[in-house]
Image (cartoon, rainbow, N blue to C red):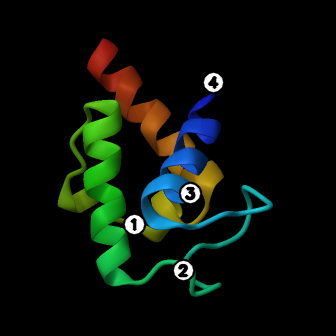
Amino acid sequence: MTHIDKVAMLLQDALNIDLRSQDVDLFESGLIDSAMFIELLMLLEDEFSIKVSLDELEPQNFGTIGRIADFVRSKLEEVAL
């Protein structure tokens, strides 16, 4: 299972968000609000054993499933070093 698949599954199972495309902007489309974003961050930290710092809370990291998966991948690579 890819990181994109895992992120999509988290969104669907925990937040009831079912996306047809990994390129849909979660914020611009109104699928995620600020409370759901905080929940998403906690889910990502728990699921992937990563920590998200305040400096990393940028729209380019979390706007789409693809960007979230890229962010998770980069965090996991940091941990592996």
**Is the residue marked by circle 4 packed among few (<14), some (14-19), or many (20+) residues within 10 Å?**
few
Residue flagged by tag 3: what amino acid is it?
A: Gln
Q: CA distance from mark 2 to mark 4?
A: 25 Å
**Residue labelled with disc 4:** 1
Give the residue drawn at x 57%, y 87%. Answer: 30
The vertical placement of 58 against 22, above or below, is below
Whether tag 2 and tag 4 are in contact, CB under 8 A, the answer is no
The vertical placement of 29 against 53, above or below, is below
**Residue labelled with disc 3:** 12
Question: Regarding mark 1 in the picture, which secondary structure is present there?
Answer: loop
Nearer mark to the viewer, of 4 and 1? 4
Quadrant location of residue 25? bottom right
Image location of residue 78, percent across then percent down? 32, 24
Give the residue drawn at x 71%, y 63%. Answer: 19
Q: CA distance from mark 3 to mark 1?
A: 22 Å
- The answer to which of marks 4 and 3 sits earlier in the sequence is 4
Q: CA distance from mark 4 to mark 3?
A: 15 Å
**Residue labelled with disc 1:** 58
Whether tag 4 and tag 3 are in contact, CB under 8 A, the answer is no
Residue flagged by tag 2: what amino acid is it?
A: Phe
Q: CA distance from mark 2 to mark 3?
A: 16 Å
Image location of residue 13, percent across then percent down? 50, 53
Question: Regarding mark 4 in the picture, which secondary structure is present there?
Answer: loop
- The answer to which of marks 2 and 4 sits earlier in the sequence is 4
